Image (tube, rainbow, N blue to C red):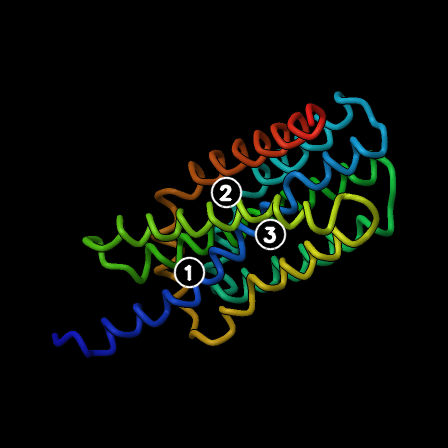
């Protein structure tokens, strides 16, 4: 089979918007994960309350994470990601309409439920379309782009602050950016995505949920020491 054949070229073209979405996912996470504990601290809530609310993200991700591959298999990769980021944007905006740790804890839990979808489905996508010999390089690029986005997130918070509705609405807008690069490519075969997902999805979700919880806690501590 020649390098220019559709079977080879199509996956390469498909990966370009996935890489763009990876950077947007990281940027959205870099803003969203530390924002709630920082905002609660600015409101004067104690550290125990902040910790409980922050942990709701990880609890939500763990509670729904193992169902994400089935979701992707049923609806397709792009609809799963687009649906998740739209709901995530609505949840981000909902923080501006509510107050108090109970309401924010519920929203954070729901955000955790939705937040794992783009992470896991994008990995499902890459594991399906990338040849095994190139998979390590592609996953390295993926991880680097997510990390770059997460590193830029706190810088955005330095600009928009953690007061009022502006940072939450900024997070909502950045959530929608995840979907934009994915509107062009065709969907992957659903059965292939589901088969690929079963090997790593549960482990991925556990690691992601632990890292998000740790990141939000570290961000809160850093803010208190500043």
Label 2 secondary element: loop
Q: Which residue is mark 1?
A: 19
Neighbor class of circle 3 (other Cα within 10 Å; few <14, some 14-19, many 20+) is many
Rendered image quadrant of residue 38: top right
Cβ atoms at labels 1 and 2 below 8 Å apart: no
Give the side of residue 129 with respect to residue 171, left or right: left
First along the sequence among labels 3 and 1 = 1
First along the sequence among labels 1 and 2 = 1
Rendered image quadrant of residue 203: top left
Up the image or down, 93 lies above or below 102; here it is below
Q: Quadrant of the C terminus?
A: top right
Q: Which residue is mark 3?
A: 28
Neighbor class of circle 2 (other Cα within 10 Å; few <14, some 14-19, many 20+) is many
Up the image or down, 184 lies above or below 56; here it is below
Cα separation between marks 1 and 2: 23 Å
Instruction: Where is residue 119? Give x, y as percent.
Output: 49, 50
First along the sequence among labels 3 and 2 = 3
Label 3 secondary element: helix
What residue sits 63% from the left and 32% below the top?
219
What residue sits 69% from the left and 45% below the top?
110
Foreground residue among 31 and 130: 31
Cβ atoms at labels 3 and 2 below 8 Å apart: no
Question: From the viewer's perspective, is the residue at label 3 or at label 2 nearer?
Answer: 3
Q: Quadrant of the N terminus?
A: bottom left
Give the side of residue 185 with respect to residue 5, left or right: right
Cα separation between marks 3 and 2: 22 Å
Instruction: Where is residue 116? Give x, y as percent.
Output: 55, 47
Instruction: Where is residue 103? Give x, y as percent.
Output: 83, 40
Foreground residue among 133 and 173: 173
Q: Which residue is mark 2?
A: 66
């Amino acid at each position: 089979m020649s390098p220019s054949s559709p079977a080879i070229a199509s996956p390469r073209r498909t990966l370009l918007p996935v890489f763009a979405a990876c950077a947007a996912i990281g940027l959205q996470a870099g803003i969203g994960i530390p924002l709630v504990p920082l905002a609660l601290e600015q409101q004067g809530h104690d550290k125990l309350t902040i910790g409980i609310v922050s942990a709701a993200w990880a609890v939500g991700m763990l509670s729904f994470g193992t169902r994400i591959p089935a979701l992707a298999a049923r609806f397709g990769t792009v609809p799963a990601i687009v649906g998740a980021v739209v709901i995530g944007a609505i949840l981000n905006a909902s923080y501006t309409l509510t107050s108090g740790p109970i309401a924010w804890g519920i929203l954070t839990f729901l955000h955790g439920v939705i937040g794992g979808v783009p992470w896991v489905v994008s990995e499902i996508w890459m594991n399906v379309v990338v040849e095994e010999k190139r998979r390590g390089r592609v996953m390295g690029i993926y991880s680097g782009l997510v990390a770059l986005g997460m590193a830029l997130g706190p810088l955005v918070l330095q600009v928009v602050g953690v007061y009022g509705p502006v940072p939450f609405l900024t997070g909502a807008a950045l959530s929608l950016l995840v979907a934009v690069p994915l509107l062009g490519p065709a969907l992957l075969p659903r059965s292939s995505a589901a088969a690929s997902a079963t090997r790593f999805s549960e482990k991925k979700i556990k690691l992601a949920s632990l890292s998000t919880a740790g990141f939000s806690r570290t961000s809160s501590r850093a803010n208190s020491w500043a």
